[in-house]
Image (cartoon, rainbow, N blue to C red):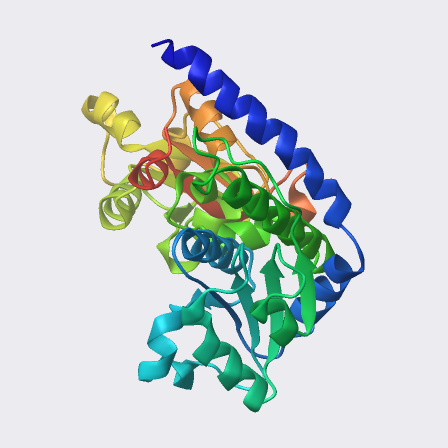
Amino acid sequence: MNYIKIAKKAASIQISELKKVNKIFNKSFIQAINLISNCKGKIILSGQGKSGKIAAKISSTLSSVGIPSFFIHPSETSHGDSGSIEKKDVLIVVSYSGNTLELSPMLKFANRFGIKIIGCASKKDSMLLKASDVKILLPKVNEADPTGMVPTSSTTLTLLYFDCLAVALMNKIKFSKDRFKIFHAGGNIGKNLLLVKDIMITGNKLPTVNIKRTINEAVKIINKKKLGLVVVLNNGYVSGLVTDGDCRRAIKDLKKNNKIKNFMSRKPFFISENLSVPKALSIMSENKITSLCIPTEKTLNKKNKKLKGIVHVHRILDLGIK
């Protein structure tokens, strides 16, 4: 059997059927957006079988963009889970036929207590759409399997519809990279969206020393702060820095009372706190350094800069960014 040919045919059927989604971006689509965006409670998704899997994914997408949502199994609502649904919530129910028996108790409960329902089905006179406040009527589609019965095109189209609805909602609530970062802090995408200001070392953790202090005092600060360097300040402005490597290389010439200004080596690299963390790591790699200084925004473009923070390579690598 030519499996690649079979796969291409299945893909071709689904791609063709997916075009039908454009016909259902109508008044119901707008009503659903308004109902979800104005919801004072939670967005609860439900569905049975394959539709339930799609509903769970929709719920996950909404939560990931800052719209509180969770999935509830319809058969469990008769056994106590209906207590999770409150009047201020919005219930989104997905079912291609719209007549799945397991949905009945949940729909009756929602109708009884005035809970708004967004129903999604392919049959206009189905039990689900009759019980719904917002009726999303899916087009009839050809499934991609040999029997024409296994949910393939229908589930893909449903998922596409709600992904488009999620994108529209993201525009309505002005969803941004910063908000994405909040909800995806542990993922690779979220990590790569981090800005320097999100991970930089600030305040009392900063290794700084006055230019009038001795090298002995500088070494103590390097050891205490454990960043391998100390930033030298002159009247509050960055004058230079000394690394533990500088101290080791010059150890034969060091005396405890030597002024630190005599051993300041290179001036630090400065970057904006609004620079992305991967970009900061790239700058470190290019210049073979382990730390970057972040000045205050007011002094960023000035010759004399005040120190606001430090970003260290170990902090970046600990986050798994490479």
- The quarter in which the C terminus is drawn is top left
**Residue 273 falls in image quadrant:** top right
Determine whether 219 is above or below 41 in the image.
above
Residue 61 vs residue 301: left or right?
left
> Is any part of residue 72 visible from this angle?
no
- The quarter in which the N terminus is drawn is top left
Q: How far from the left and from the top, in percent, is residue 199?
A: 43, 48
Q: Give the farthest residue toward the front.
A: 147
Question: Going 55% across and 46% down the picture, which residue do you hit?
Answer: 159
Q: Give the farthest residue toward the top.
A: 2
Residue 6 vs residue 218: left or right?
right
Question: Going 25% across and 23% down the picture, which residue do you hit?
Answer: 250
> Is any part of residue 9 visible from this angle?
yes
Relative to the observer, which residue lies in front, 50 or 250?
50
Q: Give the farthest residue toward the right.
A: 27
Q: How far from the left and from the top, in percent, is residue 63?
A: 50, 60
Relative to the observer, which residue lies in front, 207 or 104?
104
**Residue 140 falls in image quadrant:** top right
Question: Going 61% across and 87% down the picture, which residue do you hit?
Answer: 114
User: Count the marks: how many?
Assistant: 0
Question: Going 51% across and 19% down the picture, which residue do you hit?
Answer: 9
Q: Give the farthest residue toward the bottom.
A: 113
Determine whether 102 is above or below 208 in the image.
below
Q: How far from the left and from the top, in percent, is residue 86?
A: 51, 85
Relative to the observer, which residue lies in front, 82 or 4?
4
